[in-house]
Image (tube, rainbow, N blue to C red):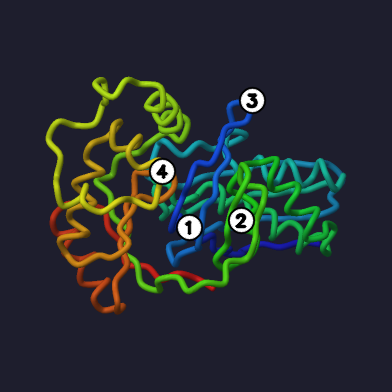
Amino acid sequence: MQFSGLQVYAPGKVNLSLKVVGTLPSGLHLIDSVVVQVSLYDVLIVDELRIGVSEPDFEIRVETDRPSVPDGPANLVFRAAQAFASRTQESILFKARIRKTIPSGAGLGGGSSDAAATLRLLNRASGERLSETELESLASTIGADVPLFLTVGPKRVCGVGEILVAYDAPVPRHLVLCSDGTELSTAAVYREYDDALTRPVGQSRKPDSVVAMADAIESSNDLEDAATALHPGIRLVRVELLRRGGREVAMTGSGSVVFGAFQAKAEAIRVAAELRSDSFWAQAVETLG
């Protein structure tokens, strides 16, 4: 089967809450998180896709203005295509470009969503060679967040990300995402989280200058203090969202993006525009599903 000229949209995600509930002997952390996809999309542009060609070939071209996004085998899209071919024993010619809109190192899951979009596309093109369960299992080998992007809708995510359950409680509809553009490493944030658990209270790395407005409202994300210790600017972003009327303000994932909920779409659009005029990266989005 052959395809070309396709555009596949890969949404970002927001962790409405994130609790760290334990650590495995391997060092991986166990979480309990409510996650929802949002209307901020990377676009996978497929220049050529052929299933069943005589010789497998993989070529990923990433068009982005962010040098931190790798191409070739280091890219999750490449790894997803390679994993699908290996699991199904299909010969695949796959050439694609990724138009990045979701910022990297932001806690929005852009790379994982790109990989999930690739798996869904390849499975459809191959005539559904893998069942939903098999596709989810394959996705988990690529990255902890990849399985949650295979289907749309709010989810409760547990374990190391492999346990997904539909979340039926109401979730906010209109969000503003905001950051100062800093990229954070997930591994570095978790290391800081672990270090803070054993650090004497007097040696806290929390900034001396504490903004009372931000600290008065407890975050629903257990990683926010660790991320803020690494990058104190997260607290300032939080203040800006609270000052403009944001509700349920918290960091998503391991940061650095902070989100706030707003009652109406027009209000969210206005606040995002104000934040951009103050030199922040900001987007008004809606939750999906």
**Which mark is drawn over residue 13?**
1
Q: Considering the image in quadrants, where does the C terminus appear?
A: bottom right
Q: Name the residue at 28% across, 65% down.
A: 247
Kindly indicate whether the residue at mark 1 contacts the one at mark 2 (C-beta within 8 angstroms): yes
Mark 2 Cα within 10 Å, few/some/many (few <14, many 20+)? many
| Measured Cα–Cα span from mark 1 to mark 4 | 17 Å
Kindly indicate whether the residue at mark 2 contacts the one at mark 3 (C-beta within 8 angstroms): no
Residue mark closest to the camera, 2 vs 4 = 4
- Three-letter code for the amino acid on which mark 1 is drawn: Lys
Q: Which residue is mark 4?
A: 222
Left or right of 213 in this view: 105: right
Q: Name the residue at 76% across, 47% down.
A: 84
Q: Name the residue at 39% across, 46% down.
A: 106
Residue 241, by quadrant, is: bottom left
| Measured Cα–Cα span from mark 2 to mark 4 | 20 Å
When the figure is inspected, residue 211 is found, relative to residue 217, above or below; the finding is: above
Mark 4 Cα within 10 Å, few/some/many (few <14, many 20+)? many
Q: Nearer the viewer, residue 24 or 191?
A: 24
Question: Callout 2: helix, strand or loop?
Answer: helix
Left or right of 248 in this view: 211: left
